[in-house]
Amino acid sequence: MPRAQTAMHDNPEPTVWVLTDGKAGDELQCLGVAERLGVVPEIRRVKPRRPWAWLMPRGPIDPREAPDRPASPLKPPFPDIAIASGRRAVAYLRALKQASNGATYTVFLKDPRTGPGTADLIWVSGHDRLRGDNVLVTATSPHRLTPGRLVAARAAPPAAIASLRKPRVAVLVGGDSRHHRFTRADSERLTGQLDALASSGASLMGSPSRRTSPALGAAVAAVFAKHGGWWWDGTGENPYLALLANADAVVVTADSTNMIGEAAAAGVPVLVFEPTGGHPKIAALVSALEREGVVHRFCGRLEGEAYEPIDSTPIIADAIRQGWLRHRAALGFTGS
């Protein structure tokens, strides 16, 4: 049966698990949503062995990680809300729902590939196909860039950023992915456009990602050095938040929907550079944000105006809270 609730008040605070296999992109999105709920979640990571990992997302969980096992990621007491993401977490979210006798309100971020019945609430981006009564659709992905964190980072920028003249342009460089590849021609095109942008009077500040190749990173860094910009060399704290908070525009490579969505939370023009390749989902996101006047194709110059920041994270968090409160009431708990 559902576990007893001892505290009943107008704004109950749920216990929350974040359930993933530890992949950074999945876990950060879940954490961003949990934090907007105003709670500190418990992080649970699944580690299915072969052959169970091969059967994900449709197969059963690894028996070694069953809820009654001491080291199980599903070990009780079960949470009020579980927020999961990633292919390997799908079966575990189903198992948690069953083990809690339906008491845990389950949430899955992104298309689980197993239909809308996978969780009580599913969030997907607008470029995903999944739809249903319990499927929430937003234009951009959830993240941890809260307005408060952006304001704080804007008020106290690192010295290297504060010393740059305006307009400051944050340059967020990705790398090769399943759908994109940075050829030599792409690198030359990107650096040539950045050189033109800096020559027009803009200050460049930026950082590579984990996927940025040494050659691409070095080529971009050389343009920054030529124009007195600041390129993060990987030492010290990652300046990602400070870059977005203090930018008058953002240049971002189109190999990551997350980077594009996070850039949109800054409320400044997002200039998208497209390397070789592509994917219909990324193209749909870019087109949708183009129609909103948020995104512009990067052509070596500044374009666009400031806008009200686009942030889907609080929308997702509110849908989870309202869904959980309805679920809670259906279980027989009083209060709202």
Image (cartoon, rainbow, N blue to C red):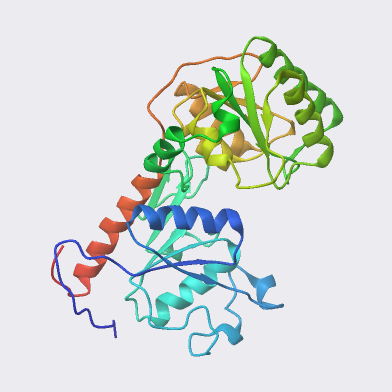
Residue at the (50%, 29%) spot, across then down: 246
Residue at the (48%, 79%) spot, across then down: 74
**Which quarter of the image is occupied by the C terminus?**
bottom left
Residue 3 placement (x, y as % from top left): 28, 83
Q: Relative to 93, say whether 39 is above or below.
A: above
Determine the image quadrant of residue 326: bottom left
Asked whether residue 173 appears in the rendered view, the answer is no
Report the side of 327 relative to 258 (left or right): left
Asked whether residue 276 appears in the rendered view, the answer is yes
Residue 128 placement (x, y as % from top left): 52, 45
Report the side of 287 relative to 310 (left or right): right
Question: Which residue appears farthest toward the top when viewing the image?
Answer: 200
Residue at the (30%, 67%) spot, across then down: 14
Report the side of 93 relative to 37 (left or right): right
Q: How many marks?
A: 0
Most foreground residue, 309 or 289: 309
Q: Relative to 10, say whether 190 is above or below.
A: above
Most foreground residue, 120 or 194: 194
Residue 299 placement (x, y as % from top left): 66, 16
